[in-house]
Image (cartoon, rainbow, N blue to C red):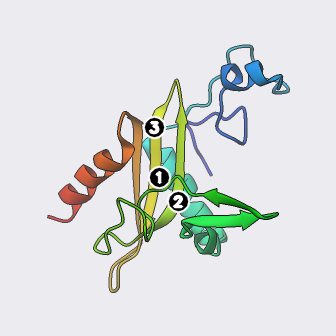
Amino acid sequence: LQLHQTHFYSVSGLDVDDVTPYGFQLKNAPKNGRNTSSAYDLTMLSQALLTQFPQILQLTELPDVTVDDVVHQSTDRYLKGLEFFDPKHGIDGLKTGTTPAAGQVFVGTSSLPGKHRMITVVMHSDDRFNDTNKLLAAIQR
């Protein structure tokens, strides 16, 4: 995918320091290994995911899922029925994450009737959803 500014040590997005206290060890990762990426690379990775596996949106658009009788609430507060939902944004996923090193991260995707699919990326945020609102307001002008 030519993600030149990306290096992942874990599939969860957690850094080595984040999982070590729980007794996990990441094979072949340096002691203080940090996952790194850029907004551009996360956009390209998201585009590839949506192109190759468009059915992912059937899961990411759900505000909650039940697995083995346990309800898991999405951390994407833009989804229908949640506090940042706004039909004019058309957000139907994609990924949230928070680590001490990265702060709050949100990769959002939306598609409105007659428009191209859009991917937004907010990184190193203290308030990812309000920062995404600012980005969406700038785009929609």
Q: As rendered, which of 141 and 78 lies closer to the eye?
A: 78
**Residue mark closest to the camera, 3 vs 1:** 3
Alpha-carbon span between mark 3 and mark 2: 14 Å
Name the element at disc 1.
Answer: strand
Residue at the spot of label 3 = 104
Indicate left or right for 22 with 57 as reference. right
Vertical relation: 133 (above or below) 10: below
Q: Residue visible at 27% across and 54% down?
A: 133
x then y, percent, for residue 95:
54, 53
SS at circle 2: strand
Answer yes or no: do the residues labelled 3 and 2 have beta carbons within 8 Å?
Answer: no
Residue 115: x, y in percent?
Answer: 33, 79
Residue beneath disc 2 = 94
Please report the residue visible at 56 percent of the width from the left and 69 percent of the height from the top.
62
Q: Residues within 10 Å of mark 1 (few under 14, many from 20)?
A: many
Q: In the image, residue 138 lies at what x, y percent?
A: 19, 56
- Real-space Cα distance between discs 2 and 1? 6 Å
